Image (spheres, helix red, strand yellow):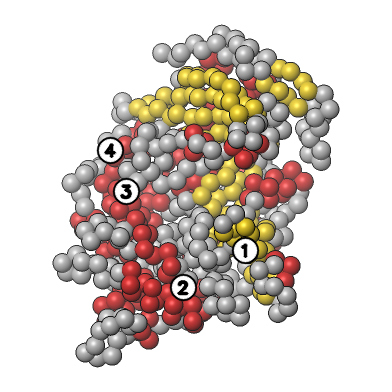
Amino acid sequence: MLHRFRFLTGLVVAAGLAVAGSPGIAQATPRPDCSTTTPAAAQKLLRAVGHPTTITSLTTGATAAGTRYCDVRASITVGAQDGSSSVIQLRLQAPIDWNRRYVQLGGGGFCGSIPTAGTSGNGNVDLGYAVASDDTGHVGGGSDASFAYNNTAAQNNWAYLSEHLTALAAKAILKELTHHSPAYSYFVGCSTGGRQALIEAQRWPGDFDGIVAGAPANRQNYLAPLSQGVRELQNRDADRRQIVDAAAAAVVNQAVLAACDGVVKDGVVDDPRACRFDPATLLCPAGTTGPGCLSAAQVAVLQKWYDSPRDDQGRELYPGGLPLGSEGGWVGADISTSPTGLSGGGAYAEQVLRYLAFPTDPGPSYALWDFDPSRDAAKLDPMAKVYNADTTDLDAFRKAGGKLMLYHGLADPLITAFGTIQYYEDVVARYGSLASTQQFARLFLLPGVYHCSGGPGADRVDWLGAIRDWTERGQAPASVLASKVSGGATTMQRPVYPYPLQASYDGSGDPNVAANWEPVPGPRGRH
């Protein structure tokens, strides 16, 4: 039964707090009053969300910077036709001085927690945004998919429903808080959050005006088994011992940088597509082993890793392999740190295969070793229709005036950037030209950046600011500024231009200063 929570509707208008330069926003800032309640809010939420929605907590809070906000916790109960159910827990932080903008943050991995339960949303709250996020319908670790075992409702929530329902609920709550709906709504996510971002653009095009999709796991049901899982299988010998280990990765990393680091020697491979490197050049002389070279078995694994995963007939299973320049991030993502355990990618793939990949879940007894990519790849197709965000049909989103920014680290060792490049090129093909696509969707490739962040490259970008400028002021991003921060200090800044443009050092001045880089044409496609 829907809990009839007494909820707030008070509105205090603070005169003189203008939102400058933002069309369609009144010049007064709506200020929620967290102490005013009404008994009608529960029924309003039910009508808005379409599923039983309960306000579980209503308090006030403040960020470390002292920004006061209404802190709302809510739950949405979702059922499926087979009788299964799943409860989405969400949190909304609505600042007292609200700028009439709503931001929703995506999750990571298998989710299971609320990103804004910590401090990840507080920076945006300090800027005046109302911020919300959710646990996608279950509580648990981000590397554990057992929540989905024989639970259709939980699978659907994680797959495509939770972010939509959270958006509906959070906006309805904001309306109750302030008597105002958001003037603009944004979604920002990376990895699983990037997939959620594309799900929103593809399936729920009216939810958000601007969307940022980082390193998207958009081919989810193929990515885990056929890319991450296949790499794990390729890196095991007949006794399932790891072939390429951390020491080998370090050797390869140095060799790749020697071959591909480019004009500015900064540890960054600017474009892995522009370099040719053959791991066979590192083969140890016949009959020898030792530091600084690789065995024949290691070379064979690397040649497979740098190529797209293929079946036993040589047919591509997934678009693209590991990029040159990703080697420094292999340990953990692709190489296990445990003598007996799987790598991060391998373990993720095994969880998907057990609980998500097939119409009937094989369960915890199923192991990665039971999956044969050549034999079983087609079995992934039915559930791919549930989880994947790989359709190029963005017609409704584009027609509604939506703006989409995709980004991906070119050194990502977990989700290859080549898949995102392929997706974007497929979108370009649908809309006829790069120019027409860039009117509403742009891709940014970050040299030397690992999965979502990290790596030797400049990995910090104000994505929310960029998508806001594009959405509200019509300023299509001609570039974004990426920064590298170490020890609290900015050590590198680079411009990142919309694909296929690339940043090229102009040959003068400090290469760590963005002004000394200029745009040049880059290659199209993933090869």
Q: CA distance from mark 2 to mark 4?
A: 37 Å
Left or right: where 242 falls relative to 493: left
- For the residues labelled 1 and 2, the Cα–Cα distance comes to 23 Å
Please tell me which of labels 1 and 2 falls first in the chain: 2
Q: Amino acid at mark 2?
A: Leu
| Residue to which mark 2 is pinned | 324
Give the residue drawn at x 60%, y 54%.
488
Residue 340 appears left or right of 493: left
In x, y percent, where is residue 30? 73, 24
User: Dot 1: what SS?
Assistant: strand
Residue under the point 46% across and 73% down: 324
Q: Are marks 2 and 3 in contact (CB under 8 Å)?
A: no
Looking at the picture, how far across and down is residue 394, in whole percent? 58, 48
- Nearest to viewer (mark 1 / mark 2): 1
The label number, if any, that marks residue 376 in the structure image: none
Q: Amino acid at mark 4?
A: Tyr
* The quadrant where residue 80 appears: top left
On the image, numbered disc 4 is attached to which residue? 149
SS label for mark 2: loop
Callout 3 secondary element: helix
Of the numbered discs 1 and 3, the one sitting upstream in the chain is: 3
How much space separates mark 1 and mark 3, taking CA atoms?
39 Å
Q: Position of residue 280 (x, y in %)?
A: 35, 84
Residue at image mark 3: 352
331 versus 461 height, above or below: below
Residue occupying the point 62% across, 27% down: 69
Tell which tag, 4 or 1, sits nearer the viewer: 1
Q: Which residue is mark 1?
A: 491
